[in-house]
Amino acid sequence: MRRTLLAIPVVGLVAVAGYLTFDPFAASVEAQTNESAESTELRTSEVVVDTLVESDDYNGNLGFGDERQLSARAQGTLTWLPAEETTVAPGDVLWEIDRQPVIYMSGQIPMYRDLYNGVKKGDDVLQLEEFLIAEGFGPDAWEADTSFNRTTRNAVKAFQKDRGMTESGVLGPSQIVVGDEALRIADTANLGDDASAGPVLTVTDAVAEVTMAVSSRQLPTFQESPDVVIVLSDGSELDASLSETKATPPDEEGRFGYTLTYIVDDSIGEAQPVKIRVERTLAEDALTVPVDALVALAEGGYAVEVQTATGPVLRAVEVIDFDDTSVAITGDLEAGDLVVVP
């Protein structure tokens, strides 16, 4: 997005043989300016090295993916439940039935049978042993395999003791729920409910996603700036990165659109509408002055008045780019110089 500088004072500066000279009218103006400066202190601003950034806000929605429900595989009374909007990771307690914890275990194979010393070999045993090793239970240098033996039983009992479970050496569907990623608690049953009466937890992915719809014309802007800032409803800001671009069906006029998905690393409590702030660097590590310090020259181009020991000196500059308040420039000046701001 290009912009035009407006309402900047014009000075009759003429370029001759590579040097800047004033015409008589401009010299008269300068004389009056110098005379006025002697009686009125000039307002100045320091030339600084800065990075100018332009930003635009777009509407989006923060959510956590589709909801799904977890049910108990045992009868009894729900005696503990996690709080809504919290996150449960593998190894944590999902809920308690009759004061017995039900554990969330990492893995791909659902717990479909009781596992105990002497049970038939299987990949579900390997999965349990890998989980126990990851949680720090079992002897040193223990390697997981498909056989549930005495070593496995001892590790299970140590795990059960640590989690406040009955130390039976047996784990099964009534005590374990298997999953491969952290979960966010969206809703729960009520304490005191019959655990088998219905879903115990409604969960979503723990990683927040921000989605927005854009047109084909807008798409390049977001592809060129994959890293954005998400502004929440309370004004707080989070960093996010573009993770997916998906085309949507054409509208009635045959125009295609796109849905963009951003991944938010930080923990977010609830779904909400947000602003997606796309930032673009206009000038990096450049000399900058206030926009009001620019003087438009009659023959074209710009200058700034640099404050010196003998008074303001007009020096031509080249404009790189600018934002609402500052302009990045190049020219015969350096950081620390003072420029006159009318």
Image (cartoon, rainbow, N blue to C red):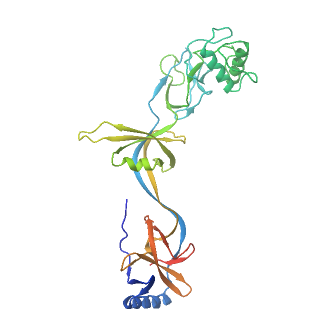
Q: Nearer the viewer, residue 106 or 92?
A: 106
Q: Nearer the viewer, residue 207 or 327?
A: 327
Q: Is residue 14 above or below residue 249?
A: below
Examine the rendering and report whether any part of residue 186 can be seen: no
What residue is shown at x 67% (from left), y 27% (from top)? 134
Q: How many marks?
A: 0
In the image, residue 43 lies at what x, y percent? Answer: 49, 79
Question: From the viewer's perspective, is 21 left or right of 97?
Answer: left
Name the residue at the front extreme.
17
In the image, residue 87 lies at what x, y percent? Answer: 56, 33
Q: Is residue 124 above or below residue 261?
A: above
In the image, residue 61 lies at what x, y percent? Answer: 41, 42
Q: Nearer the viewer, residue 242 or 299?
A: 299
In the image, residue 209 lies at what x, y percent? Answer: 47, 39
What residue is shown at x 64% (from left), y 8% (from top)? 119
Q: Which image quadrant is residue 265 in?
A: top right
Examine the rendering and report whether any part of residue 88 can be seen: yes
Q: Which image quadrant is residue 89 in?
A: top right
**Quarter of the C terminus within the rendering:** bottom left
Q: Which image quadrant is residue 248 in?
A: top left
What residue is shown at x 52% (from left), y 34% (from top)? 206
Q: Nearer the viewer, residue 40 or 148?
A: 148
Q: Is residue 9 above or below residue 319?
A: below
Name the residue at the right extreme.
140
Question: From the viewer's perspective, is 255 left or right of 340?
Answer: left
Q: Is residue 308 above or below residue 234?
A: below
Name the residue at the left extreme.
253
